[in-house]
Image: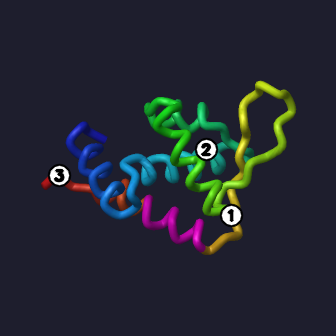
Amino acid sequence: MDVDSREALRRRSSALFGNRYLAEVVVAVVDLTSAAGDTAVTVRMVASRTGLTDSLVRPVVKRLVDAQLLLPLPQERLRGASYHEVRHDDRVWKTLVSACRLLNEGVTTP
């Protein structure tokens, strides 16, 4: 995706969801869990996939956790990475994923 398309996606994401990066993060979470066989994801994994910084991804992940669309898993180590599991059976999650995929695929520059 070129810079203009990415910026258009982020403007739409902001207008619809109140966060510029939500559409990108949701698609990255789905792609990561699908590619890895439904394993849990970390903020760092999503940041690497999207090219965003951890500090931009973390608030989006927190929003998804607060909405109970991502479930935090117990940490094995005190200072280890926090893993999150997707609630694939949730209809709201499926709808959000569909909307975010459409935004990612259908953004055209004004």
Which residues are the magenta region?
A: 92-100
Vertical relation: 54 (above or below) 33? above
Label whose residue precedes the other's in the sequence (3 or 2): 2
Mark seen at residue 32:
2
Indicate the position of residue 95 as horizontal and vertical percent values.
52, 71
| First of labels 1, 3 by sequence position | 1
The secondary structure type at the circle numbered 1 is loop
**Callouts 3 and 2 close, C-beta under 8 Å:** no
The kind of residue tagged 3 is: Thr
**Quarter of the C terminus within the rendering:** bottom left
CB contact under 8 Å: marks 1 and 2: no
95 inside magenta stretch: yes
- Coloration mode: rainbow
Secondary structure at badge 3 equals loop
Q: Which residue is mark 3?
A: 109
Instruction: Identify the residue position indicated by label 1 in the image.
Output: 88
**10 Å neighbourhood of mark 3: few (<14), some, or many (≥20)?**
few
Place of residue 75 in the rendered image (x, y in percent of width and height, measured from the top left):
82, 37
